[in-house]
Image (cartoon, rainbow, N blue to C red):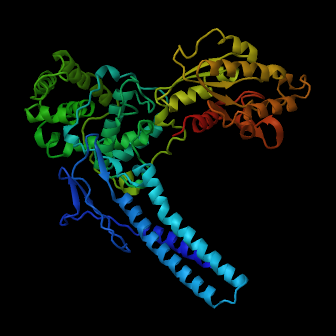
Amino acid sequence: MKKILSIIFLILVFGANLLFLSTTTHAETADPGVTTIEGELQIKKPILGINIPQLDFSNAPQNVDEEGYLQLPWIGEYIAAIYKFAMVVASIIAVIVIILSGARMIVSAGGEEKNAAIKRIGQAMVGLTICWGSYAILYNINPALVEFQALKVKYVEPVSIDSMTYNKNPEDSGISPITSNTADLDQLFKAYSACYGYDWRLLKAFAAAESGLRSNSNFDKSTPYKGLFQEYVPYCIAGLNIGKFPSSLNLKCTPTSLFDPELNTAAAAATINYNLTSKSGIQQKCPKASFLETLVLMYVAHNNGPAVMQYVVGNGGCTLETIKEQVISYYTKGAGKKCKSDCVTTEHGLRKYEFALNIVNPYAKQYGVSEIFTSGGKNDSICPAKTGKRVLTAPEIICGAKWSGRKVLALGDSNTEFASSYAYSLTQRCANITFKKEGHSGENADFIYNTIKDRNLRSEGFTDIIVWAGVNNIIGARAGLEKIYNKAKGDGLRVIMITITPWKDYGFWSRTPNAAKITKDTDDWIRSFTGKDGYVVVDVYNNFEDPNNPDALNPTYARDKVHLNAKGQEILAGYVSKQAFSE
């Protein structure tokens, strides 16, 4: 009998899950169960694949609440219906068990069989009491315990790209482009411009003006504009929607993913084409504009927002002089609205115009651009929106948005001091976090501790500390590191601890008794902090050990016998990012 009841219970559980998984939603309009939010969002009551007796989903509230949430009651209603249905089924089973056990008790000759029947009746009664009494008990303790609150879903109101204005200042942009090889970026610009047919060097000119061709650019950390084209999450989302890029490209707009050059370029390229070719765009409103006039209008739209450009061309701003007048007009009249806090000075509007004319145009000339659209036109064979393939590999080191605004002290010896240290790589890839490195070449942990012992690291703005030291004077490493950890913890910092990396055959290895054992013991002690509140352990000893020479540094990542080369440092930065600063 117990096995039968267990099987019935499992069937009920499985059935509940099956019912839940078979729930579907629709968005047809001709139905009274549809909830419409401002004529755009339509929500229809779920339709179950298998009906549950007496379950009738209610309509969701017609509007968002005062906090901007949609209230969806259906999950609570579904669970309540399943509970009631299960109660009825359980009661029927219990009654059947009682009847059968009673009959068996009557016809039994007594003894064990009668006792077993009485026991089953008692168990069924206890089950019924628990089944029905639990609700009553919980209700009497607190009625809220037996009520299901509606699911709250934040409603994000769609924003038309035509209404977008950007608050970027020209002073935030326009630094000189980097002089290093930009071949990868050129391939990126060629691929995404091929989706629309305009000269790829326009993208390069815009990126040079906005970020100096730096994908990690975030000039003013108080503003949300980031990356090659200084994109911002809402504008990035709008650009991707316009471009209709396939999911295979893995393009998702977040404050940190904006540092992905491919994401930044995709959103910018699609938006630039929209500003050029839409019904309210430059070509429609200013068909006779020269190359220079079109270029200036394109950058007005990119740096200031489509709404500013549309105001300009809508008021006849198609020549350099009228563009200048209308840009100034927009920023002094608030686009026809009453001038409040968002209205600025004539000088500000003038700087916007002059930046487009005097910064972007020279870059376009430098890169050899003489016309907007190329003779070859679109090329779907290399357009990622058509091929579904990325041009560049997605960045491996991206710090999570929840760590934005943190200030991190990278403290250590010569490995940290190098210009190519892991701290530099983190700075390049995680521009949402401020990293400051303090490396002390040739110094041991005690010396490094003395550099911070009289400082209040928290008052200096630090929130985290990364400690990678100890190989110099390995015998006293643990004592020195412990003082550093305690000091940082006492100042209220999160402590990120990197294990000592392999160093066999380096100078003083042979002069240090039991060097391998001491190093292992010290690293084991560091590993013991794993999982402790306020500590993060980045254990990389095995990752950098030479598989053919235990305890030695892998030559692939070695500058020498104890120091990581640039490649090793970048890999270490990846481990630190994933362990300490991931989403």
Residue 266 in the image: x percent, y percent?
36, 44
Residue 256 visible, this angle: yes
| Side (left or right) of 48 relative to 326 | right
> Is 183 placed above or below 140 here?
above
Residue 212 found in image quarter: top left
Task: Please determine whether, in this image, residue 31 is positioned above or below residue 451.
Answer: below
Q: Quadrant of the N terminus?
A: bottom right
Position in image of residue 387 (x %, y %):
40, 56
The answer to which quarter of the image holds residue 496 is top right
Picture residue at 63% right of the left edge, 19% below the top: 490
**In the shown orientation, is residue 132 left or right of residue 492?**
left
Q: Is residue 49 above or below residue 233?
A: below
Q: Quadrant of residue 491?
A: top right
Where residue 251 appears, x then y in whole percent? 41, 47
Closest to the observer, 390 or 359: 390
Looking at the picture, does residue 480 appear above or below residue 504? above
- Residue 13 rendering spot, x and y as whole percentages: 51, 69
Closer to the camera, 76 or 489? 76
Horizontal placement of 71 versus 94: left or right? left
